[in-house]
Amino acid sequence: MDVEIEEISAHDDSVKVKDNKEAMTEDTPDTVAGSTSGSTDSGNNNSSNSDISYHEDQNDGDDGLDDCDDMSNYDDDEDYMYYDDEDDKCDYLSMQAQFDNVDLPAGVEATVSWLNEPAPSSKVSSQASSSSHLAGAQTLNPTLPEHASSSFAQVPTSSSSLMSGGSNSHGKEEVTEDDLMKKYQNFKHFDVVEDFSDHHYSNLGVQGQQPPKAWSKKVQDEWKILENDLPDTIYVRVYEARMDLLRAVIIGPQGTPYHDGLFVFDVLFPQNYPDVPPMVYYYSGGLRLNPNLYDCGKVCLSLLNTWTGKGNERWMPNSSTMLQVLVSIQALILNSKPFFNEPGYEASYAGPEGQRRSNSYNEDAFVLSLKTMTYTLRRPPKHFEDFVIGHFRCHAVDILSACKAYIEGAPVGSVGKGIVQDLSATAEKSSSTFRESVSRMKNGLITLFTKNGANDCDRFRA
């Protein structure tokens, strides 16, 4: 997808972006303005029933769709969160079974390992202080497992961290919940951790040998920039024993179909970094919720040289940074009108037809974002467990309020923090198919959020 970047400063919250046609501006905090378009090279020809569908005229000769773009419609009968209220079928274990049996396309590596039952693993302490490693971490001495997995460990339903009101001691439950929320509130935006065993790139990169000093210094400089300048809605963990690895969790911006969602990315700094850009992998769960984020994990961005660009629209070894990459993903990819990320669509679908297609794409993207929330909460990425649980506790009511507003006809993206922000937007009603899909998923979300310890969710139950 063509993301063209004129200049993004690693020490500045503002980013300037230039599009071939015209700039689209993002009015959410910590985002940048710009537009994106599609890629013609992905290496994945598998289709998925979870992909977004917005092409009604499949034979109209639309340009810009690449070999990875199988836009088959998601099947309403396969909604993970659809349950019958009778006999309390809206049960967490029912949802879990549907996830384990979901039909995903062959060859989606991360999805299969992520959704299968994980093997038990011992926890590794992750409380290392970032400040103690920025200056002296020069050698990489990892002990790699024979078969490192990209899967995230499942949070057990009986875990004491998931407060569902089942404790025999009311006082003990309150103390545990209070402790968990303190961990969430004090969760660092940047930190250095130890265990990298579930990282997607754990078997690649520098393994056991001492890296060049210039490479180590550049990566340490990246760490310092991230530690000092990350926006409030991006969280990063780097690894003491593997300086070449990084994991980021990005919160979906308000005003977009991705609002309140969590999106997980694994990063590898190659041995010839920064002469080449970092490698970035997106944990899709098999869901294609954006033209730039493939279900095979590819992130299409000209800054990563995964799509064409001119001059400083592409990776610039002397000036581009990892912070720039993360902010660009949040602002340029997870934007308010992702339909127009496809190449040529802004020109091909101008006027009312383009708006209609864009609205339809946003509706499908929101449904897939809800599904992404469910498996992220069920299987949070390592070192982000407390953050994921706390995030969905605090934002459960906002998410359910948005679902309620969308079911009542508000267009996707018009609800912020549980309130319809743009009253004029309510004149443009969402589609009946979308309203039915969200309505079917809502009760399952209520049960999941309640088991996670969120309060005041049952009032949204139909």
Image: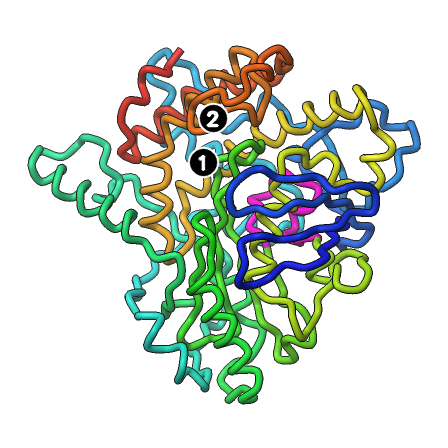
Where residue 151 appears, as percent x and y from the top left, is: 47, 54
SS label for mark 2:
loop
Q: Name the residue under label 2.
A: 81
Residue type highlighted by circle 1? Thr
How far is the residue under mark 1 from the one under mark 2?
8 Å
For the record, the magenta segment spans 282-300
Taking 176 as reference, is 40 left or right? right
Residue displayed at 75% across by 59% down:
313
- Where 261 falls versus 353 (above or below)? below
Where residue 97 appears, as percent x and y from the top left, is: 44, 34
Residue displayed at 82% across by 60% down:
310
Name the magenta segment's main secondary structure.
Answer: loop
In this rendered view, identify the residue nearer to me: 241 or 178. Answer: 178
Q: Quadrant of residue 46?
A: top right
Q: Is 52 contained in the magenta span? A: no
Taking 89 as reference, is 231 left or right? right
Where residue 461 appears, as percent x and y from the top left, is: 37, 15
Residue displayed at 83% across by 42% down:
21
Label annotation for residue 374: 1
Taking 228 as reference, is 214 left or right? right
Residue type highlighted by circle 2? Met
Residues at discs 1 and 2 in contact (Cβ within 8 Å)? yes
Q: In which quarter of the image is the C terminus?
A: top left
Label annotation for residue 48: none
Taking 2 as reference, is 374 left or right? left
Task: Estimate how packed mark 1 is, as few (under 14), some (14 to 19) or many (20 or more) residues with alpha carbons within 10 Å.
Answer: many
Q: Is 285 contained in the magenta span? A: yes
- Where 191 falls versus 204 (above or below)? above
Where residue 114 appears, as percent x and y from the top left, is: 50, 49
SS label for mark 1:
helix
Q: Quadrant of residue 72?
A: top right
